[in-house]
Amino acid sequence: MFNVSEKAVNEISRLLSEEEDKTMFLRIRVVPGGCSGFEYEMGFDNEIDGSDEVFEENQVKVVIDKFSLGHIKGGTLNFSDGLNGTGFGIDNPNATAQCGCGSSFTV
């Protein structure tokens, strides 16, 4: 299970509306890197393979591969547009530690 907040759905919808390819969706990946061991990658994609899990909320698709989902299962994708910064972030219940800037984590 993976959750997508209403603010994140709204922002993904807004960004996708600017894309010419209407088959696009948001892909989330966990990759080795950062000062804590793993970091998140997000971007638009239009190809789904057999190891992907698809989560759909209000007609917005978020796709996560099996490896990545194992590291963020039960998490929530959020979007912040406040004074402390703008952007997407993941509330990850599996992270045991996070770097000071919040861009990498340990499981």
Image (cartoon, rainbow, N blue to C red):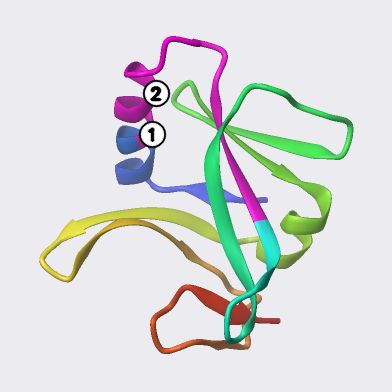
Look at the picture and state if 7 lies above or below 46. below
> Measured from the top left, where is residue 25 in percent x and y?
55, 27
**Residue 73 visible in the displayed image:** no
Q: Secondary structure at mark 1?
A: helix
**Residue range highlighted in magenta:** 12-29
Indicate whether residue 100 is drawn in magenta.
no
> Measured from the top left, where is residue 19 in percent x and y?
40, 17
The amino acid type found where label 2 is placed reads Leu
Indicate whether residue 25 is drawn in magenta.
yes
Quadrant assignment, res 51: top right
The amino acid type found where label 1 is placed reads Ile
Which residue is under mark 1? 12
Look at the picture and state if 33 lies above or below 59. below
Look at the picture and state if 16 lies above or below 55. above
> How many circles with numbers are drawn on the protein?
2
Viewport quadrant of the C terminus: bottom right
